[in-house]
Amino acid sequence: MLDEEGKEVLGNRGYKYFGAAKDLPGVRELFEQEPPPPPRKTRAELMKDVDADYYGYRDDNDGNLVQLEREEEKEAILEVVQEWKKGKQGDITDNLEPEEEIDFESLLSDKPLYTAHVDVPSQEDIKEALLQKRKKELLSKYVGDAEEL
């Protein structure tokens, strides 16, 4: 609706259809507003209800779990004891290869356990190599290609 000056009247929200015109198929959709999408939850809101129960840290407080663990522990202990008794009586045959005997005397001696196949350079050798490298760098920087000299 417009007033005498041609401006829209306040409060009519641009509504230009009256009476039966409001029921026309295309007009009805114009006035139906889409409901706003539900606001997305932030990460903080999602993590607000996550606590130790979610990760299973308080499962030990359950009496049933403790009882089940005790039963399993008893069974495991019985199995180990039976295997030990069989081994003690010699019923178990050992199919494993015999272990290599360890010479403890050689381990305790001052000799090195292995010999190096590569000679380790001395401090003087390292200093000499660094000096040669530095000379090459300086020559190539100030004279040109140091390889030609």
Image: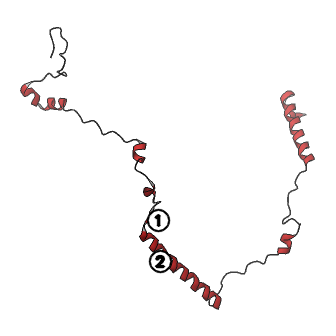
Q: Residue 100: give x, y in percent of width and height.
A: 76, 77
Instruction: Determine which quarter of the picture holds residue 128.
Output: top right
The answer to whether residue 118 is left or right of residue 58 is right
| Residue that badge 1 annotates | 60
The answer to whether residue 66 is left or right of residue 128 is left
Mark 2 touching mark 1, by CB under 8 A?
Answer: no
Q: Amino acid at mark 1?
A: Asp
Q: Residues within 10 Å of mark 2 (few under 14, many from 20)?
A: few
Q: Residue 1: give x, y in percent of width and height.
A: 15, 17
The front one of 29 and 10 is: 10
Colour convention of the picture:
secondary structure
Q: Is residue 120 above or below residue 115?
A: above
Q: Amino acid at mark 2?
A: Glu
Q: Residues within 10 Å of mark 1 (few under 14, many from 20)?
A: few
For label 2, the SS is helix
Q: Earlier in the sequence, mark 2 or mark 1?
A: 1
Q: Residue at x 40, y 46 (%)?
A: 46
Q: What number is the disc on residue 116?
A: none
Q: Is residue 64 above or below residue 87?
A: above
Residue 125 makes an appearance in the image: yes
Residue at the extreme top: 5
The answer to whether residue 62 is left or right of residue 37 is right
For label 1, the SS is helix
- Between the residue at mark 2 and the residue at mark 1, the CA separation in whole angstroms equals 15 Å
| Residue that badge 2 annotates | 71
The front one of 9 and 94 is: 9
